[in-house]
Image (cartoon, helix red, strand yellow):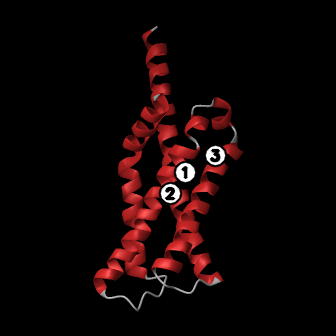
């Protein structure tokens, strides 16, 4: 029960960022059209693209919160750069796999190596943005710790 509470609190904490990334993928695919979706009318085209955004949102929730829920509380995992890298690789792989199957079976698109390469680039950008956000939050927490230390030293 405690892990389920941790799961929902983590999702609630990151929900704005996760939705922003999903919306960003939606807008990127809508405006730049990296995949040829010509055989759909406009409404189905928007539904297909929103499905891609939903895949990104679900893969972020799964990789950040479910697969590594127990590992995020482990101090050894957090200090190990390979564990941090494993989370990013799993997010990229999971969302890429979701994109490929969704575009193949729902979008009825012939999957080529070039399309998979574009999918990997899109999903890698999501992973990089998440890692930059994590680094920003970590630096912000360190800055607050240093401010408390400065206040403590200056009050003596």
Q: Nearer the viewer, mark 2 or mark 3?
A: 2
Q: Residues within 10 Å of mark 1 (few under 14, many from 20)?
A: many
Which numbered marker is on residue 59?
2
Q: Nearer the viewer, residue 89 or 146?
A: 89
- Image point (33%, 81%), residue name: 44
Q: Is residue 151 visible?
A: yes
Q: What is the quadrant of residue 53 in the picture? A: bottom left
Which numbered marker is on residue 84?
3
Task: State the separation of the CA atoms marked 2 and 3.
Answer: 16 Å
Task: State the separation of the CA atoms marked 1 and 2.
Answer: 6 Å
Q: Earlier in the sequence, mark 2 or mark 3?
A: 2
| Residue 134 drawn at (x, y percent) | 51, 45
Marks 1 and 2 in Cβ contact (< 8 Å): yes
Up-down relation of residue 35 to residue 82 (above or below): below
Q: Using residue 111 as the reference point, say whether residue 133 is left or right of it.
A: left
| Residue 72 drawn at (x, y percent) | 57, 36
- Image point (51%, 78%), residue name: 105
Give the labeled residue for mark 1. Answer: 63
- Image point (59%, 83%), residue name: 111
């Amino acid at each position: 029960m405690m892990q389920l509470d941790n799961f929902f609190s983590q999702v609630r904490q990151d929900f704005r960022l996760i939705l922003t990334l999903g919306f960003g993928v939606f807008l990127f695919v809508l405006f730049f059209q990296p995949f040829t979706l010509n055989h759909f009318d406009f409404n189905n085209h928007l539904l297909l693209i929103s499905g891609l955004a939903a895949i990104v949102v679900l893969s972020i929730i799964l990789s950040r919160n479910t697969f590594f829920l127990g590992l995020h509380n482990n101090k050894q995992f957090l200090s190990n750069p390979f564990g941090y890298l494993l989370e990013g690789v799993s997010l990229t792989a999971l969302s890429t796999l979701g994109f490929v199957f969704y575009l193949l079976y729902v979008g009825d698109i012939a999957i080529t190596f070039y399309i998979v390469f574009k999918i990997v680039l899109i999903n890698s950008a999501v992973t990089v943005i998440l890692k930059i956000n994590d680094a920003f939050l970590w630096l912000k927490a360190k800055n607050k710790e240093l401010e408390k230390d400065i206040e403590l030293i200056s009050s003596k």
